[in-house]
Image (tube, rainbow, N blue to C red):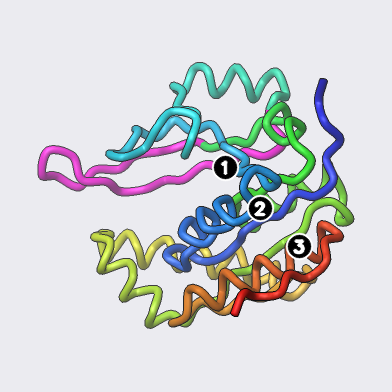
Amino acid sequence: MEKKVKKIFCIIGYTASGKDTISKELIKIFNGKLRFLVSHTTRPMRKQEKEGREYYFIDNKEFLRMKECNEFVETRVYHTKVEKNGKVVNDTWYYGLSIKEVESCEFGLFIVDANGFDEIRAKYGSNIVVPIYINVKEEILRERAKERGDLIDEFERRLADDKLKFRNFRVRVMYKNIFNDDNLQKAVDETVAFIRAEMGEKPQCKKK
């Protein structure tokens, strides 16, 4: 039997802002009470990734079937450049969060862009869908992208795309703002405290 969805916490921010890192820490801390909502994607699985943990990996045919059958609550498409056999080539990846995945838990955590957030909120409402914006200075974003080996031109393209998508989002949406420039632990602690409050939990005192 599916559980009643109480809150969907959407982690939102520019590329390289630390969304994945913070999300992984949150899942550890909440230890089962908060579930990471796993999207379907057509992009290739990367090293260290596991089916059903980072994503459900499917092909284009299955993705389109699910979309036509209205199995997704939100979908995204990314036109990107990747390196294959020493050459930079164009590629297109599809992502989608299934309704079944969302409605499998009471409290869900999801990484999404501004457009995807709008789709989820349209279905479940602003009382359930809670945006948490990870705020990072541009120069730090560039440093992080370089450290993780991103193609510079592709990073700049994604950053420009993010700026366009978030231009209206940051004006029209009320969100929790979390700074993650140089103190990851502080960012995690602030996010944890915010989520606990949204869940209706009492603040926890830190051990001395």
Mark 3 or mark 2: whose residue is earlier in sequence: 2
Secondary structure mostly seen in the magenta stretch: strand
Q: Position of residue 113 (x, y in %)?
A: 60, 55
What is the distance, in whole Å, between disc 3 and disc 1 at their CAs? 29 Å
Q: Are marks 2 and 1 in contact (CB under 8 Å)?
A: yes
Q: Are marks 3 and 2 in contact (CB under 8 Å)?
A: no
Q: Is residue 48 above or below residue 8?
A: above
Q: Left or right of 177: which side holds 43?
A: left
Q: Amino acid at mark 3?
A: Arg
Packing grade of label 2 (10 A; few <14, some 14-19, many >=20) is some
Residue 79 is a magenta residue: yes
Q: Amino acid at mark 1?
A: Arg
Q: Which residue is mark 3?
A: 196
Q: Of the residues tagged 3 and 1, which is closer to the observer? A: 3
The quadrant in which the N terminus is found is top right
Over which residues does the magenta segment extend? 72-94
What residue is drawn where x is 54% and y is 31%? 40
Q: Which residue is mark 2?
A: 115
Residue 87 is a magenta residue: yes
Q: Amino acid at mark 2?
A: Asn
Q: Of the residues tagged 3 and 2, which is closer to the observer? A: 3
What residue is drawn where x is 82% and y is 61%? 201
Q: Is residue 123 above or below residue 28?
A: above
Q: Position of residue 168 (x, y in %)?
A: 70, 69
What is the distance, in whole Å, between disc 2 and disc 1 at their CAs? 8 Å
Packing grade of label 3 (10 A; few <14, some 14-19, many >=20) is some
Q: Left or right of 79: which side holds 86?
A: left
Choose top left, top right, bottom left or bottom right for residue 130.
Answer: bottom right
Q: Position of residue 173 (x, y in %)?
A: 78, 68
The quadrant in which the C terminus is found is bottom right
Q: Give the total of numbered labels.
A: 3
